[in-house]
Image (cartoon, rainbow, N blue to C red):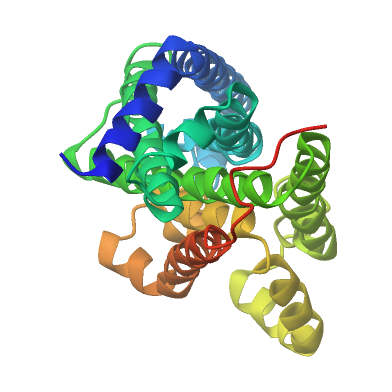
Amino acid sequence: MSNITVIARKEIGDAIRSRQMLLLVTFLSLAILISVWVASASFGLKMTDYNAYLSALTPQQRLQALTRPQLFPLTLLRSGIEYLEILGALFAFIIGFTSISRERSRGTSLLLLSRPITKREIILGKIFGLFAIWSVILAIIYAASVGAILTVGHGQLGAIDYARLLIAFVGADIYLLFWSIFAIAITSRMKQFASAILVGITSWLVVVLVIPQIGDTMDPDNQVPGGLFASLGILKSNEISILSHFHTFDVLRNGLEVTSITKLFERVAFAFLGVKDKYNQASLSTVARAFGTSIAAILILTILVGVITMMISKNEETLKRRSS
């Protein structure tokens, strides 16, 4: 058995013994269950209002009535995906931070380095271990999400829906791994744990909350519930014509958003789940082509932070420093 495999198994064992996995699965599963219930109840209210509106119309007026609201089951997971991208990223950083701080505080990092094992093997083992941990956590949450949709949400899923959901959760696996690797890099390089936490939380705030919020605020269609253009009764074709006059502004807004891996993940997940109306019921190949650049960017950023972490591990002081 290779040194990397041994470290990975140790990482998984430490996570199980610390009950991190159990707490994460319980919290995120409950959050998704509640979000699906709330979204389902909200749709129920829309249907009640629509039926009341329909009953007030004459037979002639019903011919021109508003379109009946439709429930697309996967859209019930919108809030659940947002929990993963915001709170999941924070948890991922904490788990990555704990992975290194635990070794240094116990002195086991020095013990490991006294054996025939390199710092690079330790870091790689931890990365693979964390990937396995997140894969298991998200597999359980995937099952919980399906159960929530079928029971609490009263939705029905086809084979294509399971595939869409699987793609979204694979993306979440890579996204959360990014934050755990980032935490390993920061904690390995910083002399004090407090400094690592400060840098990590600041980065989380900027990437997960600040940049996406600025981008959403710059989008005029997000300023009114249901969309500004829809509330004004502007047709989609006219909307595109209007936006063409603000091309430079839209390029700047989009450029800012894509600097955040959180926004990239959200775009991909929302598209595959059909949260964005434009891609609801679209084929998987259509969505993949539309968001191929975003998918590639998520993979590149995760690989890049992994490479940087491996470069940091060459430093002689890495994993040896202690919190003072």
Residue furthest front in the image: 114
Residue 72 visible somewhere in the drawing = no
Is residue 135 depicted above or below 36 in this figure?
below
Residue 146 visible somewhere in the drawing = yes
Task: Identify which residue, 157 or 290, lies in the foreground.
Answer: 290
Query: Which image quadrant is residue 126 in?
Result: top left
Is residue 80 depicted above or below 126 in this figure?
above
Q: Residue at x 56, y 24 (%)?
A: 39
**Quarter occupied by the N terminus:** top left
Q: Residue at x 43, y 39 (%)?
A: 114
Q: Is 263 on the left or on the right of 313, as rendered?
A: right
Query: Which image quadrant is residue 5 in?
Result: top left
Q: Position of residue 184 (x, y in %)?
A: 58, 45
Q: Position of residue 160 (x, y in %)?
A: 22, 45
Task: Identify which residue, 117 or 22, lies in the foreground.
Answer: 117
Is residue 205 depicted above or below 232 in this figure?
above
Q: Position of residue 157 (x, y in %)?
A: 26, 31
Q: Residue at x 57, y 60 (%)?
A: 264
